[in-house]
């Protein structure tokens, strides 16, 4: 049971209300125990990643202690762009709709060069998805919805004012020293999940480092409250007349707040640039004299693309910014961290239940290190394009931008930040290689694409992802084979096309045929999905032995 006392009405309040929350300190019974109390899972860091991981584990029936060294939620907008995949994960955790209702949904973006628009782009050009490509939502709102959900789950013990000051790993877990306003105490953990941010104290306690590249540039983030007729789109300028020689990014957020990123250059003085008298003229040059605005929050940052060599260190596992970091162009930070959490939660749940070997956690490391490398690669390329470091690089970039006005091939080279999409885990040891020929992108390792469905005899849309089970799911394009009903821990879903003979007995009807087209499915095709909704095997004509072997492989056997 949580020892957190937060007024729930404040969590559903305004942005100012949420940022003003001061969570009172509550002494925990563990502090009075004669010996350190052992817990199966201790998560360190109650940001979006740690909270998502705690909720996922608790919904699976696992007890979780969640420690945070602070007494408040985040201040300032910080992470604001949450992707379609993150929203689908949060739907499963019970907070997706609240995020979408409050957030600003968008699919469109525009690129500008100097004073001219170059081209628009659509991140979700096809219909048939429940969620938009992105929502923009201040991080403090996202954390508030996640904290509210965590407080509804009695298996989560959420402790604020709890700073981990020492970590002593062992073969069967780790001993943590926790500092509170009442002094220190020790807690014994079977597993420690480090979600404690880019400056991760736990990473330092293990003597680990992140390696990569630090970019010699500085950016100013400004949150501006104003009423403006800009559309709800992502606008990115290269070398605009109101900020010559640099780049600018504009995003809309809820509550009439707009995020503006100004490139400053490496020689900029961070302390000077954060002063309102230096920020306001930059904003005025962008918006014009006639627009009234109010500066809400500002920060100057330098970013890096780096990661730990390994995310798994025995019983201590790193996720989110503690494990990897990227530039903000592409919105890959928080989104990849939430995907870390989803990957780790189901695997740790199975290990704790004795349904999988501890080696399954090593596949979390392999898969998410691969995803981190993909994010770092895309983020590095975007940063190099946005901030050329030589005159030759700048000439090349500007030539590409000029060509992009008229030519599609040049638009594919322009890089204002390749926006976050989930990684396809091509080389995962948990995948069963295809034995049949398939077309399309839904290969083993890919996240299942959502699709609109209909339930027999019912009106309205039933979305494919929402119909999946919390563990493994076997999709059958046709009737469910009798042997499949004997598979433990597997949800079977029979899908029929509109008008097929077995449609009345099917679980879902692919009314628009989108699922069949996206999955290149014919009658008899089956797909096996992991608990994190990644495809791990598929067949044209599955048999019991093949499916059981794929299940064992997907559980790390």
Image: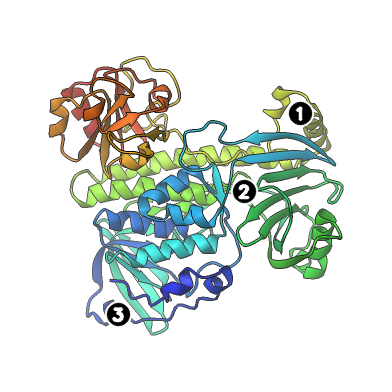
Q: Position of residue 502 (x, y in %)?
A: 23, 23
Horizontal side of residue 448 vs 221, given as left or right: left
Mark 3 or 1, closer to the camera: 1
Residue mark closest to the camera, 1 vs 2: 1
Please give the name of the residue rendered at 34% of the width and 64% of the height, measured from the top-left corner: 168
Q: Quadrant of residue 486?
A: top left
Q: How is the image coloured?
A: rainbow
Badge 1 marks a residue whose secondary structure is helix
Question: Which residue position is annotated with label 2?
Answer: 327
Question: Mark 3 to mark 2: distance in Å?
Answer: 40 Å
Q: Which structural element holds mark 3?
A: helix
Residue at point 76% right, 44% down?
A: 237
Q: Is residue 200 visible?
A: no
Label 1 vs 2, first from the N-terminus: 2
The residue at which mark 1 appears reads as: 404
How far apart are labels 3 and 1 at the CA level? 63 Å
User: Is the residue 55 above or below the residue 461 in the image?
Assistant: below
Residue 359 image label: none
Residue underneath mark 3: 31
Q: Residue at x 71, y 38 (%)?
A: 385
How crowded pointer 3 is (Cα within 10 Å; few <14, some 14-19, many 20+) is rated as some
Q: CA distance from mark 1 to mark 2?
A: 24 Å
């Amino acid at each position: 049971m949580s020892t957190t006392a937060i007024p729930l009405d404040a969590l559903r309040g305004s942005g100012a209300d949420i940022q003003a929350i001061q969570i009172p300190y509550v002494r925990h019974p563990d502090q009075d125990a004669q010996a350190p109390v052992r817990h199966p899972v201790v998560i360190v860091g109650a940001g979006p990643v740690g909270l998502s991981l705690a909720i996922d584990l608790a919904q699976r029936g696992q007890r979780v202690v969640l420690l945070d060294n602070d007494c408040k939620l985040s201040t300032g907008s910080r992470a604001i762009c949450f992707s379609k995949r993150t929203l689908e994960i949060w739907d499963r955790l019970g907070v997706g709709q609240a995020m979408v209702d409050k957030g600003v949904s968008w699919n469109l973006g525009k690129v500008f060069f100097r004073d001219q628009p170059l081209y628009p782009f659509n991140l979700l050009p096809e219909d048939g998805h429940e969620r938009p490509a992105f929502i923009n939502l201040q991080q403090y709102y996202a954390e508030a919805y996640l904290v509210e959900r965590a407080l509804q789950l009695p298996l989560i013990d959420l402790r604020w004012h709890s700073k981990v000051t020492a970590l002593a790993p062992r073969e069967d877990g780790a001993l943590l020293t926790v500092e509170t306003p009442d002094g220190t105490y020790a807690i014994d953990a079977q597993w420690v999940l480090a979600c404690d941010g880019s400056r991760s104290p736990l990473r330092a306690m293990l003597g680990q480092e992140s390696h990569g590249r630090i970019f010699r540039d500085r950016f100013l983030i400004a949150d501006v409250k104003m009423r403006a007729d800009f559309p709800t789109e992502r606008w990115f300028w290269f070398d605009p007349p109101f900020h010559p020689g640099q780049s600018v990014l504009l995003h809309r957020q809820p509550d009439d707040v707009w995020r503006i990123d100004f490139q400053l250059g490496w020689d900029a003085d961070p302390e000077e640039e954060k002063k309102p008298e230096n920020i306001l003229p930059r904003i005025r040059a962008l918006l014009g004299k006639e627009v009234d605005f109010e500066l809400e929050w500002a920060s100057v940052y330098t970013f890096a693309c780096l990661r730990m060599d390994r995310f798994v260190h025995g019983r201590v596992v790193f996720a989110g910014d503690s494990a990897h970091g990227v530039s903000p162009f592409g919105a890959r930070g928080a989104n990849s961290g939430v995907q870390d959490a989803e990957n780790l939660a189901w695997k740790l749940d199975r290990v704790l239940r004795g349904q999988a070997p501890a080696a399954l956690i090593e596949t979390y490391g392999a898969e998410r290190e691969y995803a981190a490398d993909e994010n770092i690669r895309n983020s590095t390329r975007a940063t190099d394009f946005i901030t050329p470091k030589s005159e030759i690089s700048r000439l090349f970039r500007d030539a590409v931008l000029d060509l992009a006005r008229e030519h599609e091939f040049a638009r594919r080279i322009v890089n204002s930040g390749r926006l976050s999409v989930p990684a396809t885990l091509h080389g995962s040891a948990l995948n069963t290689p295809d034995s049949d020929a398939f077309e399309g992108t839904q290969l083993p390792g890919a996240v299942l694409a959502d699709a609109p469905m209909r339930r027999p005899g019912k009106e309205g849309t039933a979305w494919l992802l929402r119909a999946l089970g919390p563990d493994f799911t076997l999709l059958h394009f046709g009737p469910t084979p009798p042997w499949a009903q004997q598979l433990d821990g597997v949800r079977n879903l029979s899908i029929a096309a509109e008008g097929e003979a077995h449609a009345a007995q099917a679980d879902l009807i692919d009314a628009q045929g989108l699922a069949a087209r996206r999955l290149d499915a014919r009658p008899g095709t089956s797909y096996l999905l992991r608990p994190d909704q990644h495809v791990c095997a598929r067949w044209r004509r599955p048999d019991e032995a093949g499916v059981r072997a794929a299940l064992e492989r997907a559980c790390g056997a």
